[in-house]
Image (tube, rainbow, N blue to C red):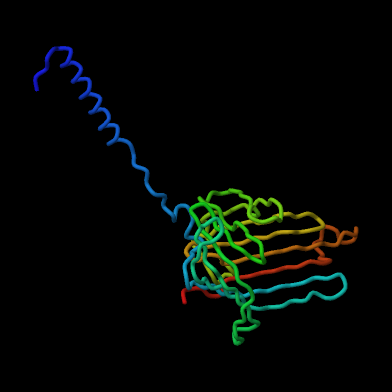
Amino acid sequence: MRFSSKKDEKYMKNILFIIVVIICFAACTPKNEEPNLRDLGLDFYPLQENLFWEYDVKEITYTLINAPVTINYQIREEIKELFNGLDNIAAYRYEKYKRNTSTDVWVIDSTGFVQKTNYWVRKSANNFIFTKLAFPFQEGKTWNGNAYNNLGAKDFQMKNVRQSYQINNTQNFPQAVKIFQVNDSSLVALNRRIEVYAEDIGLVEASYKNLNYCTTSACVGQGVIRFGSDYYQKLKNYGKL
């Protein structure tokens, strides 16, 4: 290439320099990589058709007049078909079953849906929608678990992120997370709702306590229950149909 003048030659050198700088900058700039879904925590809530979970449940009801009533039963959840759900986000229908003992036939109890994105897990239950998990996982992270219902704002909080967890010295989970949906306590009352999720499994344990204690001078602060409910649910079996 011939240049008509030194001015033109200098101009072309400047253009070439700019091109080289742009190429080098593009080569050195890191590419936007897709987030690692395991790092975000999405594997703590597996979601696909034909997954199931079975749980043992113990429920105690306390009243002012009668002795505490304890009932034991089992529940089972099955993930069914995929459909276009709330906010045009893919959702899975689930069916919940119940039976009294392992020899009884499962009887359907209720149905609902579950949605999962890279940001949250939403699940319907008893005509309400709750934001069960929020991603990415972070110790102490909080979010409004009632953002999609009319029950009033409620901060859910995650604790013990990716720590090992054990149930009754029989079940060990290398990586788990505790979700405190409610954690209010005083000398006269306890309202605490905790769910525990394990990596590659999902919900492994749930504990819901709503108790009112004795308030007289003779027993205040001693944890003597006057009335309320105590619900405990632990994983028995899980897998794919």
The quarter holding residue 18 reads top left
Q: Is residue 31 left or right of residue 218?
A: left
How many marks are shown on the rendered structure? 0
Q: Is residue 13 left or right of residue 232?
A: left
Query: Residue 234: x, y in percent?
Result: 60, 70
Which image quarter holds the N terminus? top left
Q: In the picture shown, does residue 162 fall above or below 25?
A: below
- Which residue extends farthest left? 2
Query: Residue 201: x, y in percent?
Result: 50, 66
The residue at 20%/17% (across/down) is: 11
Q: In the picture shown, does residue 206 fall above or below 104?
A: above
- In the image, 29 versus 114, the foreground residue is 114
- In the image, 90 versus 64, the foreground residue is 90
- In the image, 223 versus 199, the foreground residue is 199
The residue at 78%/63% (across/down) is: 211
Query: Residue 212: x, y in percent?
Result: 81, 62
The residue at 74%/59% (across/down) is: 191
Q: Is residue 52 left or right of residue 103?
A: left
- Which residue extends farthest top? 6
Q: In the picture shown, does residue 100 fall above or below 235?
A: below
Query: Residue 168: x, y in percent?
Result: 60, 70
The residue at 81%/55% (across/down) is: 187
- Which residue extends farthest bottom? 103
The quarter holding residue 23 reads top left
